[in-house]
């Protein structure tokens, strides 16, 4: 049985943030929301000490590549829906194990 893992990496800008605390409140909403709604792994992976920028990563593991892609598509739409965070860029990375 094949295993498919898909990682979504999203660069975001939080323009209204004037402190790390303010940025983390927005990022926490995005990360915790994605975890609870879509059962994905999620973390802030870069720019932790920058007030208005963050890199977020979301991962999905499935026996079906189509299911993994569907879940990550939903996560990406979820991230884009946050008005407090502007998406600067998105990357996807696949890992397939036979």
Image: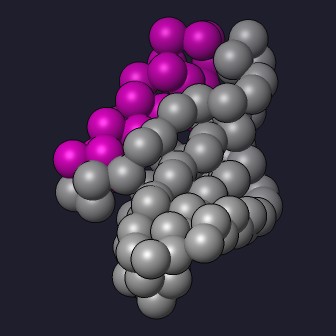
Magenta-highlighted residues:
16-36
Q: Name the residue: 55% across, 63% down.
A: 5
Q: Name the residue: 50% across, 68% down.
A: 3
Q: Position of residue 52 (x, y in %)?
A: 70, 29
Residue most extreme to the left: 36
27 part of magenta stretch: yes
Task: Give the quadrant of residue 30.
Answer: top left
Q: Position of residue 43 (x, y in %)?
A: 52, 33
Q: Position of residue 37 (x, y in %)?
A: 22, 57
28 part of magenta stretch: yes
Q: Compared to 65, does 17 lie above or below?
A: above
Residue 82 lies left or right of residue 55; in this view the side is left
Whether residue 15 can be seen here: no
Q: Compared to 57, does 3 lie above or below?
A: below
Q: Compared to 20, does 42 lie above or below?
A: below
Q: Name the residue: 40% across, 29% down.
A: 28
Residue 30 lies left or right of residue 17; in this view the side is left
């Amino acid at each position: 049985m094949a295993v498919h893992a898909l990682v979504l990496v999203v660069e975001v800008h939080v323009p209204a943030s004037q402190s790390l605390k303010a940025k983390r409140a927005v990022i926490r909403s995005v990360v915790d929301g994605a975890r609870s709604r879509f059962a994905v792994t999620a973390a802030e992976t870069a720019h932790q000490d920058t007030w208005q920028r963050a890199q977020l990563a979301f991962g999905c593991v499935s026996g079906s590549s189509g299911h993994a892609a569907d879940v990550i598509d939903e996560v990406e739409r979820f991230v884009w829906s946050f008005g407090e965070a502007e998406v600067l860029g998105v990357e996807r990375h696949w890992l397939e194990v036979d």
